[in-house]
Image (cartoon, rainbow, N blue to C red):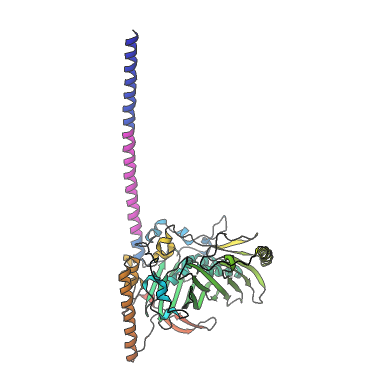
Amino acid sequence: MNVYFSFDLIFDLVTDVHFSFCLLILRFQVWSLKLEQEEEKNKALTEALQTLATEHHKVQQSLFRTSALSTLTEDDFYDAESGQQLPLTAFLPDFVLLFHRTCLPVPMFSRNEVGIWSILKKCIGMELSKIAMPVIFNEPLSFLQRLTEYMEHTHLIYQANATTDSVERMKCVAAFAVSAVASQWERTGKPFNPLLGETYELIREDLGFRWISEQVSHHPPVSAFQAQGLKDDFIFHGSIYPKLKFWGKSIEAEPKGLITLELPKYNEAYTWTNPTCCVHNIIVGQLWIEQYGSVEVINHKTGERCNITFKPCGLFGKELHKVEGYILDKSKKKLCAIYGKWTECLYTVDATTFDAHKKTDKRNTDEKKSNKQEPEEMPPPDAETVQVISGSELIWKITPRPKHSAKYYAFSTFAMHLNELEKSMEGVIPPTDSRLRPDIRAMENGDIDLASAEKKRLEEKQRMAQKNRTKSTEEWKTRWFQQGPNPHNKAQDWLYSKGYWDRNYTHLPDIY
């Protein structure tokens, strides 16, 4: 009796286990089928979105890059609840941004095995723009493209346009002037020298501007540019003559030239120059960059100005990357203070509060001072972020770089897009556009030998063209910019002479 009971019990248990196992398999099959169906749905949805995005892009191109901002008013740039400025991208469909690449075709090559000293030891104290440098020093961008990075924080211009207070506008314009050099942080590669007659254009509907630049002089090298809002709500222009000098352990770049921002709505014009940039430890040690010097932003209508000091590194790196200054009225009375780091953010605060903070900070620093000096071979520490003073207002914050930036010449997301050659550009951009330069394209694709060979070929071609011009009675003429006095301070400048966007590119020089 007990034996039969045991067998029956075992049979029942086995049956239950078998049934449970079968039920589990059935459930797994049903779950797998549902998962497969969901994957198919997601795939179909993704393909539909990609098709929609492609069609949207084609429509944009057929409308010849019509501004997507045409229906916006200045009030749209502010959040109703917080009162904070919103980026222009907040008003555009997300898929508009999918067409900007987020990395380069291949990572950058290693410079570790390059004998830099054997190349540079003959250049001490000389201006590097007159010396043909090996391609290993470069990043895959022309200087014309590098200049375009001024526009990464264009929202600050729109923010200035949206306020009726001139001091508030000056805060935004001063922040824009500081943000213009933010892209140089950790950028130790040298951009390619533009060829005479080289051009570069960029249209960014998402940021609300279009840009044109031209290399207007070879000796000295001068690059002229103009950007304008897509609703003609601002004009940003300038001409830059970068002077590069090698000082044994560092390379110093002094950005000669003038920068101008015009806001037609207020009939205002602002002018300024950029600070000096220095790359340290060229021969030995870790490369690091600092900006130093004074920048004065002047409102030529109101007489207000913002005096900004880019602090030199100093002992122990305490001042590295710091900027500070004041907005003054036409009688030089302090209206407010500006402070922060050009690599991070910028704040504004009451001038009296700022002065009191500086006195306290200096007193604390003096107590901690020692006579030991940091060796130049090591980059100064930069662990601390900006110390925010009570009552301060944030006016600018740097756009974070992608996590893989170090693999791609320390490019920002904005910089990644600059040399992208889209199919929609074929037959539209002029043959002198920087995107069509074979040496830059070869370097971007990782072919360093070809990039070096093409760089030498283009430089030789440029020299031959110069020789031929000296034998000819025909004088070289720029196409899109003309030299003349700046209309606001009468300084020597290069001004846009219109016509580029008519897309008539006949009789352009063969420079590539």
Drawn side of residue 342 relative to residue 351, left or right: left
Q: Quadrant of the C terminus?
A: bottom left
Q: Can residue 71 be seen by looking at this rendering?
A: yes
Residue drawn at 61 percent across, 60 percent down: 388
User: Which residues fall within the magenta stretch?
Assistant: 28-56
Residue drawn at 32 percent across, 21 percent down: 14
Q: Nearer the viewer, residue 449 or 6?
A: 449
Q: Is residue 186 magenta?
A: no
Q: Does the magenta stretch include residue 55?
A: yes
Residue 36 percent coordinates (x, y): 31, 41
Residue 98 percent coordinates (x, y): 38, 58
Residue 17 percent coordinates (x, y): 34, 23
Whether residue 20 is situated above or below residue 279 in the rendered picture: above
Whether residue 105 is situated above or below residue 504 in the rendered picture: above
Can you tell which quarter of the image residue 497 is in?
bottom left
Q: Nearer the viewer, residue 170 or 135?
A: 135
